[in-house]
Image: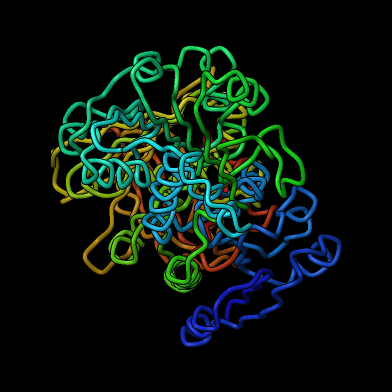
Amino acid sequence: MAPRVLISDKLSAAAVQIFKDRGIDVDFQPDLGKDKDKLAEVIGQYDGLAIRSATKVTEKILENASNLKVIGRAGIGTDNIDKDAASKKGVIVMNTPYGNMITTAEHAIAMMFAVARQIPEASASTHAGKWEKSKFMGVELTGKTLGVIGAGNIGGIVCARALGLRMKVVAYDPFLGEEKAKQLGVEKVELDELLARADFITLHVPLTEQTRNILSKENLEKTKKGVRIINCARGGLVDEAALAELLKSGHVAGAAFDVFSEEPAKENPLFNLPNVVCTPHLGAATTEAQENVALQVAEQMSNYLLEGAVENALNMPSMTAEEAKVMGPWVTLAGHLGNFIGQLTDEPIKAINILYDGSVSKMNLAALNCGVVAGIMKKANPDVNMVSAPVVAKERGIKISTTNQDKSGAFDGYMKVTVVTEKRERSIAGTVFSDGKPRFIQIKGINIDAEIGSHMLYTTNKDVPGIIGTLGLTMGEGGVNIANFTLGRSAEKGEAIALLYVDAPVPGEVLKKLEETGKFQQVKPLAFDVA
């Protein structure tokens, strides 16, 4: 059955057509996002939800999203999506961070020009039949210092445009390295230095607990007298009431805001102040940007639903379509390795250690980690997946560590998973053969070569004669057909294991008979999701 996608906000016809051309069953209801009760009522019918900013994806809506796998936001901001609830539900949240970068950066530059030359006020005055030429005395941008808070995708474009205007650019960004700063042609500084030096300040950071009110009353008072402040990023980054007071006092010469702490902004301390330019969140409002983000989100969602490619996800490691093709068998193996240990572990898990050897160590390890953790968690929570598993693990205080190394054995690449509890450590290793089929190659340090089936039986015992006969006879008498039989031991008369691939679940009475022989330390039926 084709995946179903609901579009609950306005998206271009070309984006809708992309879904159709890719074989997606798309339901275009551009006004549905405004009706949260109706959306909650129908969301369970869909595998994907494509939105802009009007649709609010709340925890209540997600509770009803029984089949939802992905939410695609046509644009950058995802404040309208409860990402924590989505992660716990196992729903990927994607955005389109590159489709409107240039448009938003250009708007910031335009707002800087507007506030520097008082263009909106001068235009209104001229339209009113006045000719107040001497009233609107502006300042040049050339030679001025621009302070950029956040030098990522959009901030980086603003830096380039400002340098083209012959401005001096200083940037504050905790994630900006010295080498990247040199490439951008900017001077990396701390926030206090930026505030003291900048003639213009522009913000280009997301709204997080760390960035909320980054321009607080205290920080605003540290700014250079006559500074002009531009915010085309997110409302809530600036203390608007404090800024209004500094504008009235003349310490701040002007401000240009496209975003506000409360939107739609019906009233705000900045409204109706002289030399304050305000626009209604127009940063991405160009024909080109709206088309770009719509097409991008349609492609991304289709790639995920049809090919497993994860692009621009905010709550899961990204994986391209090309990576998905190569890594598919390894992701499957990761899940099987985790699932094996998860089914054997009854006590609380303290840590999960994952070793990547050889060719697999060069792959997207973050995605493989998610596969392992999801497999381990499935016993306790059957609904867990690669998105929600890391969240569940974090909530339980489980430490996850990875090690990658060059080829060290007979296989081109392999993975080894070790789970640590208060009582013991358990480990299992596996690889992917040239035919693309995952195999178990080591359990408890004992080398084996086991095909993975939907139904399996795992036993441990001392290496003594008669084990094969006991297993074969008991299974045969119980009507259980063995498709594949793998044995291994640590040493002669040492610890031994058996892993049987069977055609159907082993009945309880057969398991009981095996246990009653007294020959086995452990008799454990296992189940794997094998396509």
Q: Can residue 81 be seen?
A: yes
**Point 58% across, 77% down: residue:** 3
Q: In the image, is residue 196 above or below residue 512? A: above
Residue 166 lies left or right of residue 489; in this view the side is left
| Residue 68: x %, y % from top left | 65, 63
| Residue 325: x %, y % from top left | 31, 67
| Residue 491: x %, y % from top left | 26, 32
Q: In the image, is residue 218 above or below residue 513? A: above
Residue 223 lies left or right of residue 408; in this view the side is right
Q: In the image, is residue 193 above or below residue 338? A: above
State the scheme by which the image is colored. rainbow
Quarter holding residue 333:
bottom left
Q: Can residue 467 be seen?
A: no
**Point 62% across, 29% down: residue:** 395
How many numbered dots are placed on residues in this image? 0
| Residue 522: x %, y % from top left | 54, 37
Residue 240 lies left or right of residue 387; in this view the side is right
Residue 127 lies left or right of residue 97; in this view the side is right
